[in-house]
């Protein structure tokens, strides 16, 4: 009887470990539209890549620029974004009610709504 009980506990722990894998990462996957912009967005892919879409309006005309890079979640609700040139930006992030807030040193830099 003790062996069956122990097997059930071990199985429960293993199942909980597998169901919780990727929890933080999976909540950030998808497209996030910047609050107050005309279409600026971040798209986080499950493979660790991201796209940054910025609409622009200049003397040469209007358009949409797409940059890309990689992202990684770190301890302390930090996200590291590395662009194609290798430049890294480290933000503190918070997701609440489908709103992603990126902050640097406690100051909110940008907010995004999940698309």
Image (cartoon, grey):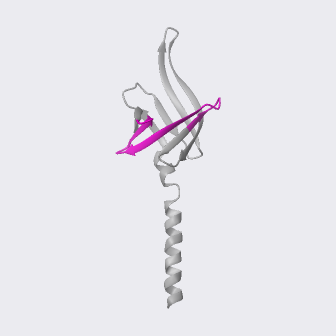
The residue positioned 50% from the left and 71% from the top of the image is 13
Q: Position of residue 41 (x, y in %)?
A: 46, 32
Q: How many marks?
A: 0
The residue positioned 48% from the left and 19% from the top of the image is 56
Q: Position of residue 97 (x, y in %)?
A: 34, 45
Q: Position of residue 34 (x, y in %)?
A: 41, 31
The residue positioned 49% from the left and 73% from the top of the image is 12
Front-most of 27 and 90? 90
The residue positioned 45% from the left and 28% from the top of the image is 40
Front-most of 102 and 43? 102
Chief secondary structure of the magenta span? strand
Question: Is-magenta flag for residue 30?
Answer: no
Left or right of 53? Residue 110 is left
Name the residue furthest right: 85
Q: Position of residue 35 (x, y in %)?
A: 37, 31
Question: Is-magenta flag for residue 83?
Answer: yes
Name the residue furthest top: 59
Residue 114 visible at all: no
Front-most of 98 and 73? 73
Task: Quadrant for the C terminus, please.
Answer: top left
Left or right of 35? Residue 67 is right
Q: Is residue 18 above or below residue 115?
A: below
Range of the magenta residues?
81-106
Name the residue furthest left: 97
Residue 95 visible at all: yes
């Amino acid at each position: 009887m003790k062996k069956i009980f122990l097997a059930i506990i071990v199985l429960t722990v293993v199942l909980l470990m597998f169901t919780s894998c990727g929890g933080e990462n999976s909540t950030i996957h998808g497209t996030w539209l910047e609050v107050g912009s005309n279409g600026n967005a971040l798209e986080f892919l499950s493979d660790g890549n991201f796209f940054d879409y910025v609409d622009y309006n200049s003397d040469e005309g209007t358009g949409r620029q797409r940059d890309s890079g990689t992202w990684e979640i770190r301890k302390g609700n930090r996200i590291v974004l590395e662009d194609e040139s290798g430049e890294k930006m480290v933000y503190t992030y918070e997701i609440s009610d489908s709103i992603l807030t990126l902050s640097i040193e406690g100051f909110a830099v940008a907010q995004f709504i999940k698309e």
